[in-house]
């Protein structure tokens, strides 16, 4: 092998050694480095190693630190593209995401783990639990996401089929056949991916779970003229409060102990007015739905609807209908 080619190979192996086999707790002496290169049939002299480390620092911008290991000088790669704590966050997000299948979660965590040393990679994989979490079973979600991104970037509509699961866990497709949507954005809410866009059939902004979409195709047809749309406000109103339903301005009376709960649900900019020494009022546009009532009920007598009166009546009726399910059985 020509000397120049051998030098390039040596530098590649040296970079690999530092990335995979060194960190703050696992330092490498020059003798260690020479021995590891020798395992790959690459010979190196001590002076050459010093020069190579400087090349990696200067040309590859690798943060190789020098420390004392007993009586010897040792080296390690202090930081790379990601800090270890950042990789932990990424792995946690992948493991917790319901829209990523268990198989794909393990694959992604394995790839993320290769962004740090082998020692820390094993630590990452030990600490992240994927099994027994609620996960989607739709393996094609990544292709769906890519197709939707392509459509958004090119200003084209998408067509797709949409399904739910029956009691036997079989897919049941919506009777509308293929849906056509002008996609505006993708949103990750409540551990699921949603495609948000204009749905002409209902003349409204609608959202669809990406893991429930199938056979997503980018159309040649341009998207319909974009309606007024703010992704942040839409997500807060629809996903945070409370799925689909009619929108009403609702006034709530809340116990003072719920200030953090209210801010978590509606955002830190929610205005809270004092009602009395123990309660406060908020007013907020809310998508009224069974999910909204469920949220109210879990807070018990610490929150109540003040207005509109029609919603108070609707809530009473909702409670009565649920109560009938638990009436005395005369039979």
Image (cartoon, rainbow, N blue to C red):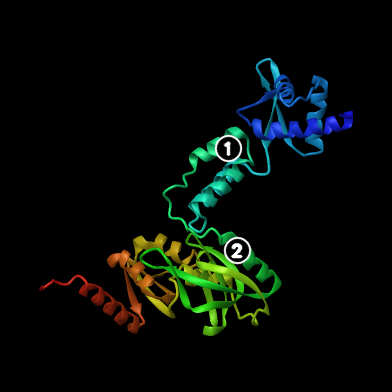
Query: Which mark is first along the chain, 2 or 1?
Result: 1
Q: Is residue 271 visible?
A: no
Q: Is residue 141 visible?
A: yes
Residue 36, x across and y down, in percent = 70, 24
- Write down the quadrant of residue 250 in the picture: bottom left
**Front residue of 305 and 137:** 137
Q: From the viewer's perspective, is 68 left or right of 61?
A: left
- Label 2 CA crowd tier, 10 Å (few <14, some 14–19, many 20+): some
Q: Secondary structure at mark 2?
A: helix
Residue where numbered disc 1 is placed: 121
**Image quadrant containing the C terminus:** bottom left
Q: From the viewer's perspective, is 194 left or right of 249?
A: right
**Rendered view: 52 above or below 183:** above
Q: CA distance from mark 1 to mark 2?
A: 28 Å
- Write down the quadrant of residue 80 in the picture: top right
Q: From the viewer's perspective, is 224 left or right of 122?
A: right
Residue 57, x across and y down, in percent = 78, 35
Q: Secondary structure at mark 1?
A: helix
Q: Residue furthest left?
A: 330
**Rendered view: 146 above or below 93:** below
**Front residue of 22 and 130:** 130
Q: Residue at x 64, y 44 (%)?
A: 82
Q: Residue at x 84, y 30 (%)?
A: 7
Q: Residue furthest top?
A: 71
Q: Which label lies toward us, 1 or 2?
A: 2
Residue 327, x across and y down, in percent = 17, 72
**Front residue of 269 and 33:** 33
* Disc assigned to residue 145: 2
């Amino acid at each position: 092998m020509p000397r120049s080619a051998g030098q390039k190979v040596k530098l590649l192996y040296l970079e690999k050694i530092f990335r995979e086999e060194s960190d703050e707790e696992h330092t490498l002496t020059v003798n260690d480095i020479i021995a590891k290169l020798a395992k790959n049939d690459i010979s190196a002299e001590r002076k050459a190693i010093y020069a190579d480390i400087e090349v990696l620092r200067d040309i590859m911008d690798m943060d190789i630190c020098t420390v004392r290991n007993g009586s010897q000088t040792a080296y390690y790669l202090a930081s790379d593209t990601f800090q270890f704590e950042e990789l932990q966050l990424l792995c946690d997000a992948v493991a917790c995401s319901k829209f990523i299948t268990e198989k794909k979660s393990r694959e992604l965590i394995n790839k993320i783990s290769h962004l740090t040393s082998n020692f820390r990679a094993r630590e990452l994989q030990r600490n992240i639990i994927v099994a027994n979490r609620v996960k989607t079973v739709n393996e094609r979600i990544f292709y769906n996401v890519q197709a939707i991104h392509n459509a958004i970037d090119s200003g084209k509509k998408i067509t797709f089929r949409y399904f739910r699961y029956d009691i036997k866990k079989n897919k049941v497709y919506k009777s509308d056949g293929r849906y056509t949507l002008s996609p505006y954005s993708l949103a990750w809410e409540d551990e699921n991916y949603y495609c948000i866009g204009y749905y002409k059939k209902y003349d409204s902004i609608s959202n669809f779970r990406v893991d429930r979409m199938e056979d997503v195709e980018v159309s040649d047809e341009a998207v319909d003229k974009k309606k007024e749309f703010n992704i942040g406000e839409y997500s807060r109103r629809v996903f945070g409060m409370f799925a689909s339903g009619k929108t009403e301005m609702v006034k709530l009376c809340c116990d003072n102990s719920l200030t953090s709960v209210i801010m978590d649900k509606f955002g830190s900019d929610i205005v809270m007015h004092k009602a009395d020494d123990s309660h406060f009022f908020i007013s907020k546009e809310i998508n009224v739905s069974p999910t909204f009532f469920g949220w109210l009920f879990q807070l018990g007598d610490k929150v109540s609807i003040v207005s509109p009166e029609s919603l108070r009546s609707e809530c009473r009726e909702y409670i009565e209908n649920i109560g009938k399910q638990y009436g005395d059985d005369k039979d």
